[in-house]
């Protein structure tokens, strides 16, 4: 009888310890850690913590630096293809192999659209990132080359000299992260906002 009672007490103590540890981890990981990390982020990098929003002069949100937007007006610089139309509710793209008929069909259509909108620039100069998805389908950047090849079209449609457009592309070209990682890139939304300013002059 005594042994049974001792085993019951030991089992109850063990169960109580598990419950206490569980509650402790819930408090630490579910409340304390998120509050501390959010507080530090707001203190050290408030713009990133709030979503890296880009705002207009009135303070209205135009978009985010981290999520691309679809520009269909040929007066503007175009971003990458997005199979999810840049809808940020969920990220991802069709994981088609290079021989997949659907991918071939879509790329052929993208090339045909390019030829129609950019007759002054041969297809041989068309950068691959303008006709390919990013892994997330939300990439807000293009390569500097992808911006440069659009300048003849935009210059013709807006009347802005190509030299001026070259200048804003150079001004909005971001270097490699920490000077080492990734490739030089241009944020399409920021570039088009700068283009808007040029068109107002």
Image (cartoon, rainbow, N blue to C red):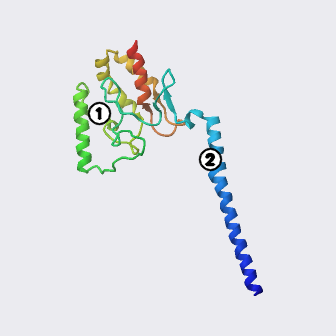
Q: Are marks 2 and 1 in contact (CB under 8 Å)?
A: no
Residue at image mark 1? 126
Could you say which is closer to the camera, residue 116 or residue 69? 69
Image quadrant in which you'd find residue 67: top left
Image quadrant in which you'd find residue 112: top left
Helix, strand or loop status at disc 1: loop
What separation in Å lies between label 2 and label 1 (alpha carbons)?
A: 45 Å
Expressed as whole percent of the image width and height from the top left, the position of residue 172 reads 45, 26
Q: Which mark is residue 51?
A: none
Q: Considering the image in quadrants, where does the C terminus appear?
A: top left
**Relative to 77, residue 44 above or below:** below
Could you say which is closer to the camera, residue 105 or residue 61? 61
Could you say which is closer to the camera, residue 101 or residue 33? 33
Expressed as whole percent of the image width and height from the top left, the position of residue 36 reads 66, 44
Which class describes the residues within 10 Å of circle 1: few (<14), some (14-19), or many (20+)? some
The residue drawn where x is 48% and y is 23% is 56
Count of marks, rendered view: 2
Expressed as whole percent of the image width and height from the top left, the position of residue 194 reads 43, 21
Side of 149 where 188 appears, left or right: right
Side of 21 where 117 appears, left or right: left
Which class describes the residues within 10 Å of circle 2: few (<14), some (14-19), or many (20+)? few
Q: Considering the image in quadrants, where does the N terminus appear?
A: bottom right
**Relative to 9, residue 179 above or below:** above
Helix, strand or loop status at disc 2: helix
Residue at image mark 2? 34
The residue drawn where x is 25% and y is 48% is 102
């Amino acid at each position: 009888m005594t042994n049974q009672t001792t085993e019951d007490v030991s089992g109850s103590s063990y169960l109580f310890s598990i419950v206490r540890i569980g509650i402790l981890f819930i408090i630490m990981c579910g409340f304390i850690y998120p509050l501390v990390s959010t507080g530090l982020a707001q203190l050290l990098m408030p713009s990133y913590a709030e979503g890296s929003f880009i705002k207009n002069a009135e303070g209205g949100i135009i978009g985010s630096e981290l999520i691309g937007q679809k520009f269909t007006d040929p007066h503007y610089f175009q971003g990458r293809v997005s199979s999810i139309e840049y809808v940020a509710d969920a990220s991802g793209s069709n994981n088609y192999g290079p021989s997949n008929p659907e991918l071939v069909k879509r790329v052929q259509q993208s090339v045909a659209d390019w030829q129609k909108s950019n007759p002054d620039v041969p297809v041989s100069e068309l950068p691959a990132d303008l006709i390919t998805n990013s892994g997330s389908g939300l990439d807000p950047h293009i390569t500097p080359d992808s911006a440069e090849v659009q300048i003849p079209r935009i210059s013709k449609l807006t009347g802005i000299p190509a030299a001026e457009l070259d200048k804003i592309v150079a001004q909005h070209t971001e270097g490699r992260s920490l000077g080492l990682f990734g490739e030089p890139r241009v944020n399409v939304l920021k570039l088009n906002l700068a283009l808007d300013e040029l068109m107002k002059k």
